[in-house]
Image (spheres, rainbow, N blue to C red):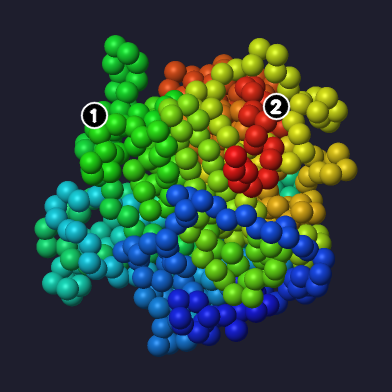
Amino acid sequence: MRISGMLAAVVFSAVVVGLASSQPPPGGGKVPPGKFKGPKEARERPDALKVDLTEPPAGLIQNPRLMAKSVDPKIPAGYALEGDAAWVWCGASGEDSAAGVALYSGKDVNPDGSRAGAVTQRVTGFAGGVGKWFRFTVRGLAEPGFAVARDGLFLRVEYFGKQGTNPLDGVTQRIDHLVERDRADLAANGRYFKNGGAVWRTYAIEFRLPFAEIDTLAVGVGFKGGLAKAETGSEFYVTDFALTPIPAPADAPTVVKTAAGPAPSLKSLVPLGGRWYYDPDPGMTERPATLVVTAKNAGRLYYMDGRLSNPFAENMTAWLREGHLDLRGNRVDKDRFLPDNVVLEFKDGKELIVHARNIPNHPTALFPGRGAGPNAIQEHDQTYYLPLTPVRNPRAAAMDKTNANRALPTGPIGFAVNGVAFFNPFDMEGSEAIDILDRCCGHPTPTNMYHYHKYPVCVKSPFADDGEGHSPLIGFALDGFPLYGPYVAKGLMAKDDTATPLDAFNMRYDDDRGWHYHVTPGKYPYLIGGFAGTPDPRSARRGQPKGP
């Protein structure tokens, strides 16, 4: 939903009213009539690649996008607000905003003489019992002026029994230090190499139920000791609540060493080729010739790289939002769920085919808009072909400082796990693309393809990248090699590692991951320096392959 149209929006069959605007409605933002035209005939995907979902799969959290109102029009349905907190359109003017809650570190909203507040939701209906594990995640954004005392920003889970009337302890995990780490480590990742830490990212806490009596959880985000020097630009925005049951660490599939090399500890997993494994559906005893993975079965797909993770599990759907353009180039006048934003095909143990609508599943700038350029975000139909076992090309060439040698093409050079394309560092004029980028380091082309030029922190990774160890996988280059976040060890970025430095391709080798790329925030080439392997030429074509 776009800020300028928020009062007319209808989502989840509930009229959204009562939202405060944390910024004035932006100027611009209307698609110039007739300027953006899609293909005259949008090709249908085959039935095997269609996904029969009309809305996101139901989870334990009610109203996860915080779009529906409660009886009180100032509070989102299912949530409680405390202290200096308000239901708002998140972010600054010129952003295609998400609904969420602002925690004000620079304003005593209540007023009670302090700066503190929280947003929480009470959750029931989960499978309880001593030893059950869960992961609670939110998407958060700390504006540059946000400031709190030490331990002043945190995720919190409280336990209750007797239908929520009997408090039974809880757990708290601070995240203010992660905000400060991002401000230090990612500062140069932003527009014009500034404020890269002011970005949407996923924060997570994993916890174990300690008592059999627990039948209610209160999950949320809170702050205390607000120290901001100004009222504006000092918010911490929160949206996209999720609560997911997870295996106990002792029971979770892991990677073990065998005589034949690393292997999953879960013997029932079916190898799909390369580093990919699948938790078989009932009746599946061996790898099928073609396995289709969508949002409905993505939780069964594992990637092995020193651990087993599900990089696509929460990244295969998106919302085509008001003001975006659909596949035919028509302006969208109401948010529409895309259940098939990413669909995967594993073929014969040799090839991964990725079908992507290329719609970001996170907030963006308001495109087109004042200061954001004339292009819109449009639905596309990209198809990428990746080898499951990529091999380095001894004749590969990395980019020079201006890509004058055309080592990387214009257009997609890879994609993130949410299906959005990666581009090389340069714009259409051959200059580094450092302006007209949103907080997630993306913007659309003249053909309305949204894409990333730098490290897209907003992409939801299979586990939180908190700088405490090796970063998670965030995408793939078109040669099939994986792309990881910035860290190689606790507090050490790949770009700063002198013991095992990156090569000219932004690539390095380790025993757990083999050859792999790393993003380098603030340091050229930012994503990849060239194709170290060999891309499939079919990946340069648009959309579905034509039939015989």
Label 1 is placed on what type of residue? Answer: Lys
Residue 147, placed above or below residue 165: above
Residue hosting label 1 = 267
Residue at left offset 60%, top offset 17%: 392
Which residue is at a point 34% across and 20% down the rendered structure image? 262
Instruction: In the rendered view, tell whether residue 175 sits above or below residue 169.
Output: above
Q: Residue at x 55, y 46 (%)?
A: 355
**Mark 2 — residue?**
530
Q: Where in the figure is residue 218, as x and y percent of width and height?
A: 30, 66
The one of 361 and 158 positioned closer to us in this rendering: 361
**219 is higher (above) or lower (below) than 470:** below
Figure quadrant of the C terminus: top right
Query: For the residues marked 2 and 1, what is the alpha-carbon distance in whole angstroms?
Result: 37 Å
Q: Label 2 crowding class (10 Å Cα cut-off): few <14, some 14-19, many 20+?
A: many
Q: Nearer the viewer, mark 2 or mark 1?
A: 1
Question: x, y percentage for residue 409?
Answer: 76, 34
Residue 418 image offset from top left, x and y in percent: 54, 48
